[in-house]
Image (cartoon, rainbow, N blue to C red):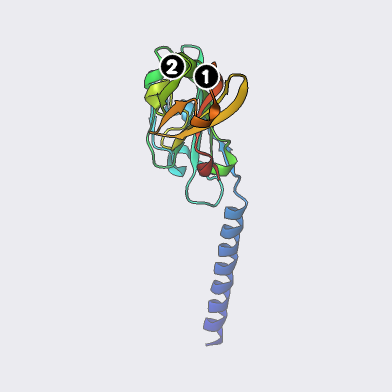
Amino acid sequence: MIRSLFVLILLASIGFVTAAWADDAATTAPATVDVTAKVKALAKDNQLTLAPDADVLGAVAGVEADKRLKVDYTVGGKSHVVTAEQGHTLNLPCDADGAGELVIVKAAWGLPAAIAPISADVTEKVKAGVKDNSLTISAANESFGVDPCVGLTKELKVEYTVDGKSHTAKASESEDLTLPAKDDGTGPLVIVKATWEMNPVQAQ
């Protein structure tokens, strides 16, 4: 009887230590993990298709359930950056990347808050849409030929001037942006900078 009780206490103690170790290991997992080598190995014949998760990438990052994969790569020597949410399928190169050799430069797997929001400079695309000092453009990947963060909602941010006065306007994905706004006044419309970027709400 005493021996049985001792064994139960011993097993309970081992279980506690094991559970405590596992919990400690989880809480000390890094917010991001460099998975460049793994992603490079998954690219075949200048193509990459994967649905990122811990099993596929062989890495544990952070303690939260949802992670994100960020990949810096080049196609035909031109640099691109893309992100994919856990479980979403990532296909590279993207349609707008053109043709050429696919080279994975860097890949990071981690918590959304640990991976900086991704954006694409689309200033020239927006400038090209200005006609007679006015602009109407759809906030969509098709308008800019790029998707800076696959699987995430994006927004268009435009810095511009009307008759020399500075303004900023935003449009959520799938919305149309019309410039100048009603209270901007009249005069020459000049696009200073335009970015197609992750909606900041999702960067938390």
Q: Give the tally of numbered discs.
A: 2
Which of label 1 and label 2 is nearer to you? Answer: 2
Please name the residue that numbered disc 2 is placed on: 129
Mark 2 or mark 1, which is nearer the start of the sequence?
Answer: 1
Considering depth in this image, is 41 or 107 the residue closer to the camera?
107
Horizontally, residue 48 falls left or right of residue 107, namely left
Picture quadrant of residue 49: top left
Considering depth in this image, is 195 or 184 the residue closer to the camera?
184
Q: Position of residue 129 (x, y in %)?
A: 43, 16
- What type is the residue that disc 1 sits on? Thr
Alpha carbon distance from label 1 to label 2:
10 Å
What's the residue at 61%, 45% (across, down)?
30
Considering depth in this image, is 45 or 118 the residue closer to the camera?
118
Q: Which structural element holds mark 1?
A: helix
What's the residue at 62%, 23% (across, down)?
165
Callout 1 touching callout 2 (CB < 8 Å): no
Residue 91: mark? none
- What type is the residue that disc 2 sits on? Gly
- 2 in relation to 60, above or below: below
Considering depth in this image, is 122 or 187 the residue closer to the camera?
187
Please name the residue that numbered disc 1 is placed on: 123
Report whether residue 44 is seen.
no
Q: Where is residue 18 in the image (x, y as percent from the top left)?
A: 57, 63
What's the residue at 52%, 82% (across, down)?
4
Q: Where is residue 85 in the image (x, y as percent from the top left)?
A: 44, 40
What's the residue at 39%, 37% (across, down)?
51
Picture quadrant of residue 94: top left
